[in-house]
Amino acid sequence: MEYVSAVPVPQPRARAVAAPDASGSRRSLAAGLLLGAAGATVVLLASGQTWAEGEASVGGGSLPLTADGQDVTGLPAALAVVGLAALVAVFAVRGAGRLVVAGLLALSGLGAGLSACLGASDSAALDEKAAQSTGDASATIGALAHTAWPYVTAAGGLLILLAGLLALRYGKLWPTMSGRYERDGTPRPRKAARTAPDPDRPEDLWKALDRGEDPTREV
């Protein structure tokens, strides 16, 4: 006579299915933070470097002049600051607001990169310095040369742009600073109203004390 075992066969846990999403959320969050912070740092540092240099004619000689990124255009640095603010704000909002802030982050990076590229061949800043230095409004710069720093600035803007794109794609899975969220970014269900602890169950009394509740108070 054969006997059938009543031991239940263990089923795979459901959380194993959700693990890839949680892991992807953490990776995208870390990448977004790293790209955004690194990009803003690169833009701010590179904007302070020499972008162009040349010589202005003064009498029978020449006066060497240089222009940094702030002289050429202050837009990349300003947009980098906006990008940093947007990167922080992404974690303070949710829903449609998060998409708006993520879009602002991406646009900040795009604007910083484009403005840096446009200023890579600019000579107006040096011409203005030449006019101020010589006292001649028609003075121009000779032996004009440009450095690679504008393109480094543009690369930093690209990093900010990538951070914004990650926030647009995966931001809904990221946690918020003020909301009650699970690791996968979904809102936690609200807890049901607590019932009064059972005085005959010491563990209930201890749990109530841990929560800062008065176990003797009736609900």
Image (cartoon, helix red, strand yellow):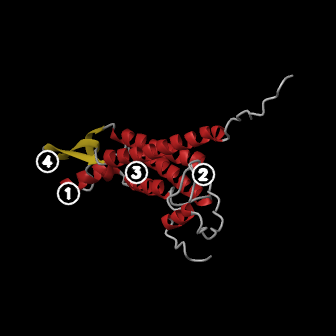
The secondary element bearing badge 1 is classed as loop
The residue lying at 50 percent from left, 52 percent from top is 105
Observer-side mark, 2 or 4, equals 2
* Left or right: 113, with 186 as reference point: left
The secondary element bearing badge 4 is classed as loop
Task: Please report whichever mark, 1 or 2, sits nearer to the chain's N-terminal start.
Answer: 1
Q: Which residue is mark 1?
A: 135
Which three-letter amino acid code belongs to the residue tagged 3?
Pro
Which three-letter amino acid code belongs to the residue tagged 1?
Gly
Q: Which residue is mark 4?
A: 59
Separation (CA) of disc 1 from disc 2:
57 Å
Q: Which residue is mark 3?
A: 76
Q: Which residue is mark 2?
A: 172
Which three-letter amino acid code belongs to the residue tagged 4?
Gly
Separation (CA) of disc 3 from disc 1:
30 Å
Which three-letter amino acid code belongs to the residue tagged 2?
Lys
Task: Please report whichever mark, 2 or 3, sits nearer to the chain's N-terminal start.
Answer: 3
Residue sitting nearer the eye, 179 or 147:
179
* Left or right: 123, with 91 as reference point: left
